Amino acid sequence: MQLGSFSNAVYTFCDWVARLAYINLLWILFTLSGLVFFGFFPATIAMLATLRQFIRKNHPPVFQTFWHYYKKEFINSNKLGLIIVAIGFILFVNIRFIQSTSNNMSSFLFYSSIFMSCIYFLIICYTMASYVEVDQALGVHIKNALLLTISNPIPSLFIIFGFAAVYFAVTYLSGIGFFFSVSILGLVVLSSANLAYKKVLSKQEKLSA
């Protein structure tokens, strides 16, 4: 009985490793097929939507599922990407401008901008997770992502530490980034977002009790 449980655990682990590697390769392929700029966000949404199916213990064919979401969300995900890039560009220009100035307020403004950039990074992660979870307007996704970022520090810390862990793994383990980097990051984002959703539901249940 114990041997059977151990064998199932090993099989499940190997199955997830194979899926993550395959999804990561598909993300690279479809990002490049969209000339990177137009392919990045559709491929990322398709990756998250495909991973979400497996997290929910569904087992659809990987390539067909990825391709389905890539085609379906190509336009809307690029609209979302345009908003993300535009705001990110404004933050970047703001930081560069502050760095070029030298006055008593520059240090405070610089670290404030860095903090805002970190908050914005978390908002992007929650927005992506929300996008593949529920069908809503883009503005609603962004608003909900902001609320999740502010009200759920622990899942947000999981995202930050998860990204840091993947960064160090990719840096010090050569070759792992090509097969696992983006798909594992997607898994980190979705798992952390699911934890945030559960916390919100738990708070709502306590308030309604």
Image (cartoon, rainbow, N blue to C red):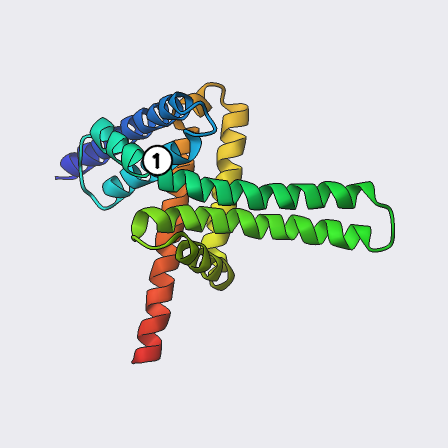
Residue 59: name its quadrant.
top left
User: Residue 67's spot in the image, x, y percent?
Assistant: 26, 29
> Measuring 41% from the left and 43% from the top, which residue is drawn there?
188
Most extreme residue toward the bottom is 209
Tell me the element at label 1.
Answer: helix
Most extreme residue toward the right is 103
User: Residue 68's spot in the image, x, y percent?
Assistant: 24, 33
Residue 34: name its quadrant.
top left
Of residues 180 and 40, the one nearer the viewer is 40
User: Residue 65's spot in the image, x, y percent?
Assistant: 23, 33
Q: Please count the marks in the image.
A: 1
Residue 161 visible to an observer of this rendering: no
Of residues 144 and 23, the one nearer the viewer is 144
Of residues 185 and 2, the one nearer the viewer is 185
> Measuring 54% from the left and 32% from the top, which residue is drawn there?
168
- 195 versus 81 height, above or below: below
> Measuring 54% from the left and 26% from the top, which residue is drawn there?
171
User: Residue 73's spot in the image, x, y percent?
Assistant: 32, 39
Residue 184 visible to an observer of this rendering: yes
Residue flagged by tag 1: what amino acid is it? Phe
Badge 1 density bin: few <14, some 14–19, many ≥20, Cα 10 Å: some
- 47 versus 97 height, above or below: above
Asked whether, in this view, residue 11 is left or right of residue 206, the answer is left
Asked whether, in this view, residue 83 is left or right of residue 193, the answer is right
Which quadrant of the rendered structure holds the C terminus?
A: bottom left
Most extreme residue toward the left is 1
- According to the picture, the residue beneath numbered tag 1 turns out to be 74
> Measuring 31% from the left and 33% from the top, which residue is drawn there?
70
Which quadrant of the rendered structure holds the N terminus?
A: top left
